[in-house]
Amino acid sequence: MGDKMQVELDHSEVRKAVLALQAFLKTKSAGKKLFTDDSQKISLLFTLWRIPKEAQTIRIPLPHGQRTASEEVCLFTRDEPQMTADQTERFYKKLMTERGVKNVTEIIPFKVLKTEYKPFEAKRRLLGNFDMFLSDDRIRRRLPSHIGKHFYERKKEPLSVNLQSKNLARDIQKLVQGTSVRVNNKGSCCMARVGHSGMTADELTENIEAAVQTLAEKIRMKGPVLKIVHLKSEKSVALPIYTSDLSHLIRPKATEAEKPATEKTPKDTKETSAEDGEEKAKKRKVEEKEENDDDKEEKEDDEEIPQLVPIVTEGKKPQLQRKKTRSVEKKHSSILLKMTKKATTPKGKGKVPKVK
């Protein structure tokens, strides 16, 4: 099952919780008893650390019987060959008396179960008439389809017994006076009956301790199992009797033997600390130099005042120059034409043709 943490119950705290619960039940039942034996069931509520992967039914033997003498037990047996239902019933009653079994109050053969208890109402009456059901292990697999789902919903499914055992009385006594826990894989809580209100405080305390230890050992889970355990009756508040600590969630400190090989010794730490001090000093010097250089650059930048200079585009200058030169050339050409006209044209003659 893996490594499991041992559940250590405080005997004095458990006994205090039992006494408190018994005192509460006495105050509630005072003046309201209709029958002489009106005891209430006392159970344990287990809260697990996580939900199990598989469902499991755990049988727990108890040092003291957790059922009263008035509770009735029914036994389902197989049909003996070449015998009627009545003959089979008489055969097993005789077997119970010979083996010293006193816990079984009624025996029902499988043939009677199939015929007389086939209607739904008959099954419901059968379920209410008995507190516990046992079955011959030879017909255990055939029962679920005949008894119905209500036996399993009320947690009264038949427990199998080997009727051919030599120690039949001891085996039935363990089942009747013991308890069982159905660990479901749909939730983290389960419950087990450990006694009744008519038992003494010492008997209840011993039953509680046995049930807790057996559950912690038999459950199919790795690591720590139980988170909280409560004690309660049918109509009372749940009293906590055990609370797990968080030691399994805290990582233990590594010992000297478990320390990694790369861990530094005191000498190595001194050398590394000296080297780190030198490196830090060098870094400080470099940072101071950089700060001084930055201060000098800032001072020079403050002394030099930038001047605003108009931006002149290069594309516009040649256009202006071209316009000016063209106008000057036109003027010079017009003056030259006039001078040539005067020089070439004689007096009294016609006009000189235009120069193209």
Image (spheres, rainbow, N blue to C red):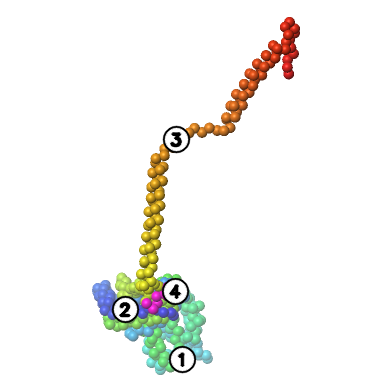
Depth check, front residue: 213 or 173: 213
| Mark 1 to mark 3 CA distance (whole Å) | 118 Å
Asked if the residues shown at circle 1 and circle 3 are in contact, with their CB atoms under 8 angstroms apart, the answer is no
| Mark 4 to mark 1 CA distance (whole Å) | 35 Å
Q: Which mark is residue 288?
A: none
Depth check, front residue: 273 or 104: 273
* Secondary-structure class at tag 1: loop
**Is 232 rendered above or below residue 97?**
above
Q: Which mark is residue 9?
A: 2
Q: Earlier in the sequence, mark 1 or mark 3?
A: 1
Asked if the residues shown at circle 2 and circle 4 are in contact, with their CB atoms under 8 angstroms apart, the answer is no
What residue does disc 1 label?
Answer: 164
Q: Which residues are magenta?
A: 256-262
What residue does disc 4 label?
Answer: 52
Q: Earlier in the sequence, mark 1 or mark 2?
A: 2
> In the rendered structure, does residue 215 fall within the stretch colored magenta?
no
Q: Earlier in the sequence, mark 2 or mark 4?
A: 2
Q: Earlier in the sequence, mark 4 or mark 1?
A: 4
Look at discs 1 and 2 and give the one toward the viewer. 2
Asked if the residues shown at circle 1 and circle 2 are in contact, with their CB atoms under 8 angstroms apart, the answer is no
Residue 95 position in % (x across, y down): 43, 92
Question: Which residue is drawn at the image coordinates 47% and 75% (left, top)?
Answer: 54
